[in-house]
Structures are given as structure tokens and as C-alpha cells.
Amino acid sequence: MIRDLRGARAPLLAVLTLAASGLALAQDAPAARSTPAAPAQTEAAPKTAKVGEAAPDFTLKDTEGKEHKLSDLTKAGKIVVLEWFNPDCPVSAGYHAKDNDVMLGLAGELRAKDVVWLAINSGAEGKQGSGQERNAKAAKDFALDYPVLLDGNGAVGRLYGAKTTPHMFVIGKDGKLAYAGAIDDGKPGAPGKTNYVREAVSALLAGKEVAVKESRAFGCGVKYAD
Amino acid sequence: MHRARLAATLLLPLLAAPLLATAAGAQQDAPPAVTARLACTTVALLPGCTNTLAVVLEVPEGWHVYAPCLNDTGLPLTLEPHLPEGWVSQAVSWPVPERLTEPGGLLDHVYTGRVVLPFHVRVPESAAGTRQTPSVHVEWMACRTACVLGRADVSLELPVAALRAAVDESPDANLVRQVRLPRALPEGGPLKAVLADGALVLSAPGAASLQFLPDADCAAPRDLLAEGAHDGGTLTLHLQPDAAGPVKGVVALAWPGDRPTDFFRVELPLDASPGSATRAPQPEESRHDP
């Protein structure tokens, strides 16, 4: 017979959970096998993110407990970059090593252009690199100068189809998802020639079409609960 | 008949060096001791012939490394041969991987346990009677619930036999023989593969189940997780509307009872008419005998 390896939990449940998760997602919602936050009654069920369409809204807390709501940022005219993050994933952490300026350098460069950069950790409680405490330590260890948000039940990660750490998403001022994929065309320890995120943001700032809208991200799998 | 003498030192394994260890907080998954070595199917190399080398990885139980397939996560294994001047290397014969589904609807194609990655090298006649040390740089990502990156430079010092000599098989020849490689899709064989209405349609009457394991550069499927494996004798894998490139990969065809699973390589250009499955060329067979 064909061997089909399988993780400990059925993936279908994740899809079903997503459909019921709603737009307002509490940062400190319980992680694995928990009931997600109830959807806001006035808002439609969330759709999975798709390039060219409205980016799913979310509200998540950072390590200081401050809430970050995507739609507030885009309504304020901000371009938003999302970096799926796991401080204990060697690929994600590798992009934050002292000799690697790909993430931090670009975040600083774009912040000077009024772009908001947010890291999101969708690791479930008890899994590699998960939790608010770990985020806070990582922010300090990696000298991150942008917020690290906790998505402990993975609902926002699923909304965006975030698969790896890192996995990058760029959202335009119009609230539409403009880019999804890898940070660049390189690999850990070897920055690529083309930084897709920089290219996407530059195009948005210039009012031009984003040339590369999607690419294949690589890294550790996001450590979802189920 | 002359037989080349056994090399005093056949193997020169190097232990894998973790490239980046997991940071604190992942104590439940200590970095795995993936080991790598270079093997040869013969005790000496044959000049003027194609010889078979293989990188052998030992992946600890519970861990996996990533095949060069259409994966949701993970860095695929990479091999970079460093061969003596005048040698010609062929592509790695990638074994059939396994599907791995993980929480969050993530799908990868992985290798577990002992991973044998054969590749053929042509050794020039001018090397006859010398000793040579081919090497390979290997990189991998190994994951369980945590992930670590690793790399190794593996080499193997081997004698090169005299011209037209015969050489014995090495103990590793059996390892390479046991590698699960896909076969070319035979005309009139048990599997039919066609593209129809924007989908890859596989049919194998009487099969217990089918899996399609796509290459990394395969035209993008719409939902590989849901449609890439199916019980029974048919499988329909819809492609994304903007899919580009050929549909290429390995079909794993399981039969009821004790009949062994078949593995076929399928490659279909997107503009292929129904029934026009093409057969990919198979790597040249290694010559173990003169």
C-alpha cells in the first residue's frame, strides 16, 4: 500500500474552524482544540486571502498588549507588510541573525516610507516557538523594532493561507492583498537578487502594477494546532 | 580476469553539521543527528564508463527531510557534486517520496529513515589506475515538530580500475538497488494518464488507491491536498486556471492484496491532447560490469 504520512491531527478541522472564526480574532484566544472567538454579527464570514482581493481584516495583540487592527491601518492610508514568524524556526530565525539584514533592514527602509511592518506568530500553544512570552524574548533577542503579534489559535494564519515561517504578505492602502509569498528569491544565508516585498511595496507607492504578485514561500511549516 | 583490489578506505563519512540550531524554547525537539555519507556501488571506479555514486542520509525516526516536489513548506534536499576534472555527472535519481499532511492543511513530500540518492558519473579513461576523491555538498532541512537545517560535505576516496577491468560490487550496491525509483509509463500499461478539461485524470482499473506526487516545477494544482490522493482506480486533479508548465510527477499506484505498489513517472504538456501521456527518459543505467 502507499504510505501516507500524517500529522497528529486532521487538517480538515482547520478549514472548518476557519469558516467559523469571524473577523475579530482575540490575540489571547486559547490555542489548540478551542472554540474560536465568535464572529462579529454585523460582518460577513471571512474569506481566505486572495491576491487582488480585500485582505481579511484582523485584530491581534502585540507583546505589549496593544491591539493592531488591519483595517484601521489601511484606512489611515498605510501599506502593511505581514511577516509570518517563528523565532525557533531556523529559517525564520535565520532571517533575523546578526549577519542577516534582509527582514530588519527592509522593515526599517520601508518604515521610512510610512509602511507598517507586522510580524505574526501563529504557532499553537506548546509548539515550537509559540506564545507571547517567546515572542517578547525574540523581539528583544532579534532587536525587532516592529510589533510581533500573537495569533495563538492560528485563525489569522489560516485566513491568509500562511504556510511557512517566513511567509510574507503585502497589503495596499486600498486594503487589497497585493503580494503573497517569499521575501525574496534567495535562501537562508544567501539573500536573493530580487526582494519581492520591496518590489511590491515600491510598485504600490509608485501607483504601479505589482509585477510579481505571488511566489512560493519556503521555511518551517506554521505550527498550527490542528 | 583482473580484479581491482578493494580500496583500503571505502568510505569517508562526515557527520552532518547543523547549520542553524533551534533556539531556546524548542527543547522538546533536540536537533536530530542526521548523518550523511557518500557511497559507490562498486569497490573501484571503471574508467570510460558510467559509475553509480549515492549520497546516503540517515534520518532519525520521527523526522523527515524534504523531497524536491511541490511542497507547502520546507527546503528540499540539495546535492552539489564536486568531481575531479573530466568527470561528467548526471542528475540525481530522486526516489519516490511520501506524502505528509500536517496541521493547518499543509502538504509536503518527504523522505524518512535511510535516504539513498543515487547519481551517475562518467569517469574518463585517463583516470585509469589512479585514486580519486569525488565529493558532494549536501544541504537539508529536517523537521519533526521543530525544524533544523543541516549540511555536510561528504567524500569518498576510490581507486580507478585499469581499462577494461572488472570490479566487484560494494556492499552499498544493494542499497542503491533497493531505491524506490519511478518507472517510465509503459504504453498499454496498468495506468492511463491524460489531461482533460483542465485536470489530470489518472485511471487504473482495479487499483486500491492512487497518489500524484508532483515535481517542484509541475503545473500548479488547484487543491493537491484534497485531490492528490484518492482511494480506488481513478484520480482527478484539477489545475489552477492560470497553471503553466507541464504536469509532471510520480504516480503511486497501490493494488489490493500483496501486489506491490507501482510507481510511474508522468509528464504531460499542458497542451497535450487526451491520451498523449509522454514518457520521460530514464537515467542511464549504471554499468557495474565491463
Image: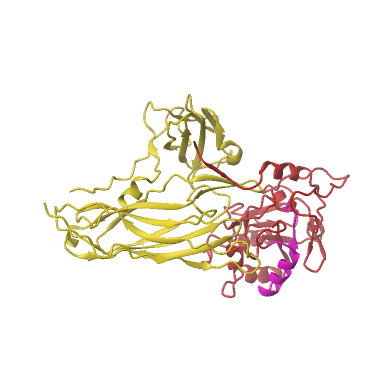
Residue A29 is situated, as x and y percent measured from the top left of the image, at: 80, 55
Is residue A145 covered in magenta?
Answer: yes
Is residue A182 covered in magenta?
Answer: no
Determine which quarter of the picture holds residue A43. top right
Give, as a single range, the part of the protein colored magenta.
A130-154
Q: Residue furthest top?
A: B205
Q: Is residue B59 left or right of residue A207?
A: left
Q: Residue furthest left?
A: B1
Residue A193 is situated, as x and y percent measured from the top left of the image, at: 52, 64
Examine the rendering and report whether any part of residue B198 can be seen: no
Examine the rendering and report whether any part of residue B128 can be seen: yes
Residue B170 is situated, as x and y percent measured from the top left of the image, at: 27, 54
Q: Is residue A125 left or right of residue B77?
A: right
Residue in the image at 55% along x and 55% along y: B74
Q: Is residue A87 above or below residue B261?
A: below
Determine which quarter of the picture holds residue A219. bottom right
The picture's colour for chain B is yellow
Chain red in the figure, letter? A
